[in-house]
Amino acid sequence: MIKPIGRSRGSFFWKNLGLVLLITCIPIAFIGIILYYIGTSRIEAEVNRAHQNQLNLSIQQMNDYLTNLEHSVVRLAFDRSMDEMLKNMDLIQEFSKTNEFMKSFSLITESNSLIDSVSLYLRDADKLLGDEVGFQSIRMDEDRKLLESLLEKERTIYWNYSLKKINKPNSKNKAIIIKLPGGQMYGSYGAFIIYLDQDKLNTMVYKLVSGEGVAFLFNENGDYLTTPRNNEPTPDQLSLEDALKNQIMKENFNDHLFKYEWRNQIYTVSYGKIAKLGSKWTVVSATPLSQITAPVTFLSRLILWISMVGLTIGLLLSWFASNKMYAPIYRLKNLFEASRNNRSEEKDEIIYIENQWRQHLKEQQALDMRIKQSIPALRESFLLQFLQGNLYTHTESEIINKMKQLDWDVENKRFAVMVAQLHGLSDLGGKFTERDAQLITFAASNIILELCSEKLKLVHVTNFQDLSVGIFFALDNSFTNEEIKGLLNKLAHDYIVSVNNVLRLRITIVMGKISDSIVEIPNVLDQTRKALRFRDLHTTNQMLDMNQFMIENTSLKHFPSELERDIVHAVNMGLEEEAVRLIQQFMIELQSNNSTELMVHQGMMKLLGTLHDTIIKHDVNLYTLYEGIHLYEQLMQISEPDPIVDWFQYKLIRPFIKTLTIAYDSNMRETMNKLHGQIQQEILLDISLEMYADQLQMSSSKLSKAFRQINGINFIDFIIRLRIEKCKELLVTTDMKINDIAGLLHYQPSHLIRIFKKSEGITPRQYREKHTQGNPSDSSA
């Protein structure tokens, strides 16, 4: 808690107190007076206007109901179906027509809430048809005379304000009479009678007022069309209604709104005239002025009380503020002393606060310097998360604001990305190994960063640690697409030259699409990295532009299915070398016809799937065999042809063949070892696979498969290899002619020469001459 300042209240304190009182209390008092005198009249005017608008809307609603009623009457009067055929119509025989009339009457009644019922009177038929009375004959002369009198009026459509219903002798109803046929004043054969619902009419008028007000309706003759609101109306109400009616009929007011004093009470009177169906009605509403202004009176008193309360609070707050005027300086001094944990000997608080503030500024500058030094690392981390798509929930403005905090103003900028992939690490003859990939990628990142720093300011290089780097550019929005492309093309060309000269590696560069929105960059970068798969494997250095790049059909144009079957056969036989040789040939076939990296990967993925299926058929546990490695995912990480072939050999085929060899029957292995030695002894005899199969009592195919799986070479190739070795021995140690050696080895001379040259690369004669140089030879081959 802050201790009070130990100073006596002098003249300065009282002067400030008076100033605060003036500043606080005078505006409050002035506002209160204005609100009371000006606000009250304004509120009263608004309340009166709102009340008048409500009355006008209610009168308009009544007018709309009567307009709807007028339209219904006119349509009914001039309905073409109501012609003189009704005069001779037999309502009983033509029951369907009668039924249609009944339905029409019901629809008319339901279409307007003011209509109580509709009836049709036919004089010649002496019948009355209606939705309330149904179908009945006129039996009493009194009723017949009443109905016939309706047809004697000169007007075609007119009002009758006291018409009784034939089934209700004492009733008096307001009704509209429509003589038939419509448009003829004489010779009517019948009439429509539309009775109004008196209760609905009363309710509609009574809605105009509430409380102690009165509302009524009268016609041009001064007859009341509404009944009193209560069954036993008070004399005051009837007297007020008569007085208002006489006043309105005697004087013609322009604005239909006036104030009327009645028995020491002022009423706000509003009336409107409605002319429908040849009659003029007047709607009158009178509401006591005290009832309308009651909310205004309450608000006026409330404003006065609020002003007084505000003035009192202002006085108290002024006193409290005067006591606290020196408190901020005292609190600030205590704050500095608490932070330094010592007491100041300086008597002048202002000088003490100034010295402390300068010390804080020095510390803040030092802190700002440390933050500024850490901003590049923070920016690198943020951009790495952003470009990897981890900030997808952030909006454009959030990303831009965050970049501004990290000293990168990317507002109103254009953005571009470029991805570079290094190739040819395996072609350097052992200069680099796969373990050096991260080091090489780091060097490539430094090269592109150095090239960009010479021309561009806002550049970020991402090291993907897999011989590929990504470059993010933020460029001025004044650059056009062509200017940006030219700048990036020049940068890419310089980068290719630098990587070729420094790292001795090939490089593929893909330039991403140019974007005006920074939130699109992670997606653009991802698409650009995927476009690396479309590089041409036969091109040394490549540049692809995603702004012009069209993805063509990436399906394999020619798939070497026969080689695939041979590879599967070699793997099944356990022939690793043969399988690897065929995979190399398979890779060459895939690279033909200008295939891209993606197309080669598709083919190798298909081969992996086929071999995967083949391995499963041998009941091998793939999880145990490959130690839980995801083969497809691992293959996707390799982009160069030679490493892909090595992966197939060492990661896929060799573990399987080892498992296959270990699992093979030990007795069969012993038998094959014996057969191996027997063949070496009998190589000069006329031997064959079938001969040894008969000796071992097994089929030729089974023997061939077992021989190949255990020895790693098929039977025929093994025989050829032994006979070539025997031929080489005879060429060097004997003087036998080629024809004699071929006969000894059970070959035709031409066939022996052909297979010898295929195996050794030279002919038998050249081999003898090469290995007998310096030794005397008495005979020639």
Image: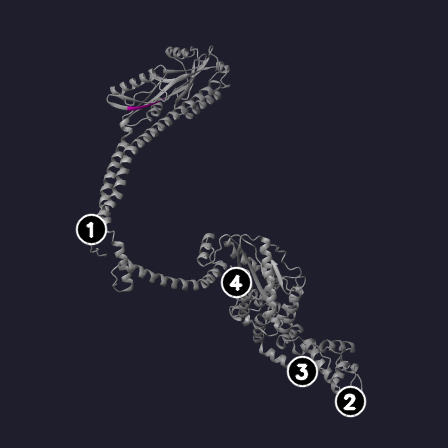
Distance between the alpha carbons at the discs numbered 2 and 4: 72 Å
Is 577 situated left or right of 18 in this image? right
Which residue has dot 1 on it? 10
Which residue has dot 3 on it? 678
Q: Secondary structure at mark 3?
A: helix
Please rate how many residues cluster around mark 2, counting C-alpha atoms within 10 Å: few if below 14, some from 14 to 19, many from 20: few
- Give, as a three-letter code, the residue at label 1: Gly
Question: Disc 2 or 4, which lies upstream in sequence?
Answer: 4
Q: Secondary structure at mark 4?
A: strand
Which residue has dot 4 on it? 461
Q: Main secondary structure of the magenta part?
A: strand
In this rendered view, identify the residue nearer to me: 326 or 583.
326
Question: Disc 2 or 1, which lies upstream in sequence?
Answer: 1
Q: Is residue 270 magenta?
A: yes
Q: In which image quadrant can residue 427 be found?
A: bottom right
Give yes or no for contact between labels 1 and 4 (Cβ–Cβ under 8 Å): no
Which residue has dot 2 on it? 776
- Give, as a three-letter code, the residue at label 4: Val
Disc sitting over residue 623 in the figure: none
Image: 400 above or below 541:
above
Image: 751 above or below 392:
below
Give yes or no for contact between labels 2 and 4 (Cβ–Cβ under 8 Å): no
Q: Residue 555 location in percent, x, y?
A: 63, 58
Q: In which image quadrant can residue 719 be found?
A: bottom right
Q: Residue 378 location in percent, x, y?
A: 44, 62
- Give, as a three-letter code, the residue at label 3: Gln
